[in-house]
Every structure is written in structure tokens, then in C-alpha cells.
Image: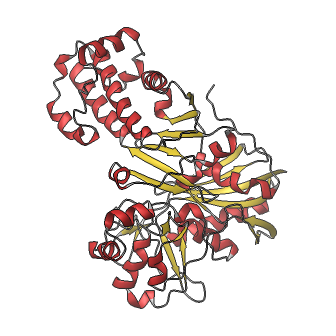
């Protein structure tokens, strides 16, 4: 029988169970979708009972069928959601949707009492998102809006740790969930922010992500991890697989740039430019920036297709031509056509750009990619410190296969090796990797595309 680690990768839309063998190669995957329900206020949320029932059923089946030898289980989930438990360990609340709005007075009170908004957000490396996305706000929101529920609260867990708790019964916390735009972590002093103690809120001290607890599943003893936040988890394969310091640029609808080798404190200016910090599994700061690059590309590609009367996916046929690039450089210099005042001018650009200035689709698309890549370079530079130790720039996701984008990055970052990379199920793989050593598995990690 193949020895395996099971990982439950729980996203907002899709829920997956994946099995990884001793080399951390994927040997089984099953995806499940669940209808959403409403919380007590009528706001959409995940059906936590159905999800946890499904997890236990899947694990019992895997353990009993005999095709795989289940050694360990871990969880990779979206962050920014908390679970509140009573003294008997029973949950008191739904898993609230992090898009739920909360009264602004709650966060404003925190800001007023702890140095003002800019300082509070800088110290916690958390942009003020105005929703339950700042998960620490959920605590104060429950205390204010549902005091009878809060009065019964004995333990508070982030979502990944709650799912692990349903199997191992351990109330723990870990760095990656605490450190992600939560308002909870004091990056200056590497501990919980003082407001938590001042409000007499008790939170478990973070443990390392390789901590496991033994639990009986399907009649056999299985090691259960502590769970991990999916964004930080997707970075783990690169942390484990790269021998040199690196920056990861994960491209898609959002382009997320992550630098685990930047220890400089986050500044208020960087926060204003959509930067934040995560914590890695070993409690190290991961400075990050984000750009809505995939969305910008999608909207403009559709507009170009309409204007030039081509298929919507015609951009995939546009090659990286030196003459095309040279012509755009000669015509426009460093002036951005599609984003005349940076990323904030996206909507204005859609209304004002006259596409007739281009002779054909290829010219227009080449200039679009030049302008988009320049926005991305700005976002990457935001997470590069003055004393930069990184030598590699990993590019993953859809733009890793865009020849113009990769060419332009190589032209700009001449001192770095640009490596296109695609790791399937990176978040789930990261969750398996953090417990692989204690399980005795020897993973093989391939970072570069063929």
C-alpha cells in the first residue's frame, strides 16, 4: 500500500481532498462543492457542518478501503475566518464570511487607541479592509453585536486550526493564519498586538506548522497537523525547493508578489500601495504586494478583440517581436497608454484610450503588455529591500507562459534569474510539505517549467 498524506484544500468555491505519496507526488484528488447557507443575519456563509462531516467521511473511507496507508492529515484553507468555541469545545458560531461588512466604528476605535490608522496598520502589516477580512475585527464585532454569544466563548481558532481541531481536539494557533491582514500580530515585537491583552482576549500562542497530534481515524492512528493559511502554504514548496533567496510572483486574476527575504518593516507608504505582510511557517515576515493584473488584462484583451475584430483569445498568438517592441518604444517612450496615471487610472483608460493609434492588434497588445509589465515591475520593486539578497525571480500562474511579459521582466531584472514555474495545487502541496519530515516522507520538488 502507498503511504500517503491527505490534505484538505478548502477554498471559498471548491473543496478538495488530495493524497500525496512519500515523494509528495499527487496520487489521488477529489473535488466537492457544497451549497452555501446563511448565517443568523442572513449573510451567505459556508456550511461548516456539511464540510466537517464530508472530511470525516472521506478520511474514514481512505483509512478503511485499504488502497492507501494513511499516515497524516493536514489542512490548507482560506484565512480571515474565526471559529468561536464554548467551554465544552462546541462551536458557537457559523464560519462567518470574510466579506461581511462590520461597523466602521469598531476598527476606528482600535486606530484611535493605538497610534492612529497608519501606525496601527503599519505595526500589524494589515491594510484596513473594512470587512471581516481583518479577522481580529471579528472578535470585537462578536463582542459588540452578539454579547450573549461572546460571553460563552472559551476558545478562538482560525479556520484551518478549527478543521484540524475537529480531528485532533487541540486548541492551537500557528503563524501563517495570524500574520495575514488580521490586525492581530505585532510585527515590530513579533507577538500579539497589545490590544488583545488590553481587551482581555485569550488567544493560543502560535506553534510551528510541523507540529502534529495523533488521532484515531478509521480504526488506525494518524498524525494530524495544525492547518495552514493557503496563501502562505503556496510559498512553502519554493521555500523548501530553492537553495537561494528568491521572490515569487504568483500571477492570475491577482498578481501577488511575495518576498520571504525582506525583513524591512512595512511602511505606511507601502500599505497605501497595496502591500502587506504574511508570516511564513517559521514566523518570518513575507513582504507582499498585489496588482489586479489578470483582471486588467482580461478586460483590455476583450476590448482589443472587439476593436480589431478578432477572437477573444487572439492574444495567445501574439509573439514577442523585437521590431514590435522597438516600434512601441520609439513611438511612446516610457509613456503609458493604457494606464496613464498608474493602476488607479484603469477605468479612465478604458474610456479615453483611442485604439486607432495602433495599426493592428499585435501592436496594441504589445503595448498593453509593456504597460502592464511596468505596473508589475513597480509592484515587485515595492517588496525588494535596499540590501537585496534575492537572486531568483520565480514566475508562476498564467503569465508565466506570456512571452512578452517574461521577456520584459528579463530585460529589467538583469541581475536576477527569471524562472518560469508552475506547481499544481501549490497550497495543498505546501500543507503536505510542512508535515512531511515528521511523517518520514522524502519529497522531490521541481520548481522550473520544462
Residue 383 visible from this viewpoint: yes
Residue 416 lies left or right of residue 27; in this view the side is left
- Of 354 and 111, which appears nearest the observer? 111
State whether residue 195 is above or below residue 236: below
Report the residue at 58% width, 35% height from top.
422
Residue 320 lies left or right of residue 29; in this view the side is left
Q: Quadrant of the C terminus?
A: top right
**Residue 26 horizontal/vertical position (percent):** 69, 44
- Residue 182: quadrant of the picture: bottom left
Residue 214 lies left or right of residue 338; in this view the side is right
- Residue 32: quadrant of the picture: bottom right
**Residue 104 horizontal/vertical position (percent):** 27, 72
Residue 133 lies left or right of residue 206; in this view the side is left
- Of 402 and 63, which appears nearest the observer? 402
State whether residue 342 is above or below residue 56: above
Report the residue at 22% width, 39% height from top.
345
Most extreme residue toward the right, as rendered? 1
Most extreme residue toward the front, as rendered? 387
Most extreme residue toward the top, as rendered? 323
**Residue 298 horizontal/vertical position (percent):** 33, 35
Q: Total marks drawn? A: 0
Report the residue at 26% width, 25% height from top.
304
Q: How is the image coloured?
A: secondary structure
**Residue 153 horizontal/vertical position (percent):** 50, 86
Residue 32 visible from this viewpoint: no
Amino acid at each position: 500500500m502507498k503511504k500517503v498524506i491527505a490534505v484538505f484544500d478548502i477554498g471559498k468555491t471548491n473543496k478538495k481532498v488530495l493524497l500525496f505519496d512519500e515523494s509528495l507526488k499527487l496520487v489521488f484528488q477529489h473535488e466537492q462543492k457544497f451549497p452555501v447557507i446563511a448565517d443568523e443575519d442572513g449573510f451567505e456563509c459556508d456550511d461548516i457542518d456539511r464540510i466537517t462531516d464530508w472530511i470525516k467521511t472521506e478520511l474514514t473511507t481512505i483509512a478503511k478501503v485499504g488502497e492507501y496507508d494513511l499516515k497524516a492529515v493536514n489542512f490548507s484553507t482560506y484565512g480571515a475566518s474565526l471559529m468561536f468555541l464554548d467551554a465544552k469545545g462546541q462551536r458557537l458560531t457559523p464560519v462567518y464570511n470574510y466579506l461581511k461588512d462590520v461597523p466602521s466604528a469598531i476598527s476606528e476605535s482600535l486606530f484611535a487607541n493605538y497610534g492612529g490608522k497608519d501606525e496601527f496598520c503599519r505595526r500589524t502589516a494589515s491594510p484596513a479592509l473594512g470587512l471581516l477580512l481583518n479577522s481580529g475585527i471579528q472578535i470585537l464585532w462578536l463582542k459588540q453585536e452578539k454579547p450573549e454569544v461572546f460571553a460563552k466563548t472559551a476558545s478562538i481558532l482560525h479556520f484551518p486550526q478549527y478543521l484540524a481541531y475537529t480531528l485532533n481536539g487541540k486548541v492551537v494557533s500557528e503563524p501563517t493564519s495570524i500574520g495575514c491582514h488580521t490586525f492581530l500580530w505585532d510585527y515590530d515585537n513579533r507577538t500579539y498586538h497589545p490590544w488583545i491583552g488590553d481587551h482581555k482576549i485569550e488567544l493560543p500562542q502560535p506553534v510551528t506548522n510541523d507540529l502534529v497530534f495523533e488521532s484515531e481515524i478509521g480504526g488506525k492512528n494518524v498524525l494530524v497537523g495544525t492547518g495552514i493559511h493557503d496563501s502562505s502554504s503556496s510559498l512553502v514548496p519554493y521555500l523548501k525547493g530553492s537553495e537561494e533567496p528568491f521572490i515569487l510572483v504568483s500571477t492570475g486574476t491577482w498578481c501577488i508578489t511575495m518576498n520571504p527575504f525582506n525583513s524591512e518593516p512595512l511602511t505606511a507608504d507601502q500599505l497605501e500601495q497595496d502591500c502587506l505582510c504574511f508570516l511564513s511557517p517559521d514566523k518570518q515576515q513575507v513582504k507582499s504586494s498585489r496588482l489586479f493584473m489578470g483582471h486588467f488584462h482580461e478586460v483590455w484583451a476583450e476590448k482589443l478583440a472587439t476593436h480589431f475584430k478578432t477572437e477573444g483569445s487572439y492574444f495567445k498568438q501574439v509573439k514577442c517581436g523585437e521590431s514590435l517592441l522597438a516600434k512601441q518604444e520609439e513611438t511612446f517612450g516610457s509613456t503609458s497608454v493604457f494606464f496613464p496615471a498608474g493602476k488607479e487610472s484603469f477605468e479612465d483608460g478604458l474610456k479615453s484610450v483611442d485604439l486607432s493609434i495602433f495599426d493592428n492588434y499585435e501592436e496594441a497588445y504589445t503595448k498593453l503588455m509593456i504597460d502592464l509589465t511596468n505596473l508589475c515591475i513597480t509592484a515587485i520593486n515595492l517588496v525588494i529591500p535596499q540590501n537585496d539578497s534575492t537572486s531568483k525571480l520565480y514566475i508562476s500562474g498564467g503569465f508565466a507562459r506570456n512571452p512578452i511579459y517574461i521577456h520584459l521582466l528579463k530585460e529589467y531584472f538583469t541581475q536576477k534569474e527569471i524562472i518560469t514555474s508552475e506547481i499544481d495545487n501549490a497550497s495543498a502541496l505546501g500543507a503536505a510539505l510542512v508535515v512531511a519530515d515528521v511523517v518520514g516522507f522524502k519529497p522531490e520538488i521541481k520548481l522550473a517549467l520544462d
